[in-house]
Amino acid sequence: MQADDCAWVRDTNLTGISAVAAPVRDYTGRVCAVLTALGATGGFDPAIDGPIGSAVRREARAVSAALGFNPGA
């Protein structure tokens, strides 16, 4: 499932594994990497607005900014 440049899965490809991911963009706005956190479904909350999802999105934005990405430009 995805929303606002972030995607998450729960037991989709591997039973027992969940993940949340956000894109890292370069100065042109092109996706150059993806930051992903994954863990065992029972102890990992992949919700986009959860603590892990929020941290992944925040760090992906920080790395993108360091690469020169300016979403308002």
Image (cartoon, grey):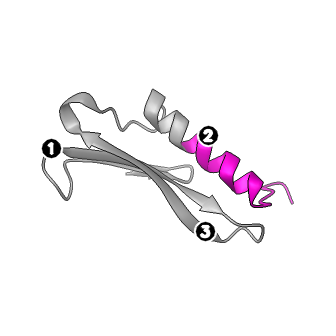
On screen, residue 5 versus residue 51, left or right, reads: right
**Disc ID at residue 16:** 1
Viewer-side residue, 2 vs 26: 26
Q: Earlier in the sequence, mark 3 or mark 1?
A: 1
Seen as rendered, the residue at the extreme left is 15
Q: Earlier in the sequence, mark 2 or mark 3?
A: 3
Secondary structure beneath dot 1 equals loop
Left or right of 26? Residue 3 is left
The amino acid type of the residue labelled 3 equals Val
- Establish if 58 lies above or below 36: above
C-alpha gap between disc 2 and disc 1: 25 Å
Q: Residue at x 33, y 45 (%)?
A: 38
Residue 14 located left or right of residue 44: left
In the picture of the structure, the residue carrying the numbered disc 3 is 31
Label 2 packing within 10 angstroms: few (<14), some (14-19), many (20+):
few
Q: How many marks?
A: 3
Q: Which residue is mark 2?
A: 58
Residue 27 image position (x, y, % from top left): 77, 67
Res 64 label: none
Residue range highlighted in magenta: 57-73
- N-terminal-most mark, 2 or 1: 1
Q: Eyeballing the image, is 2 above or below 67?
A: above
Q: Is residue 47 visible?
A: yes
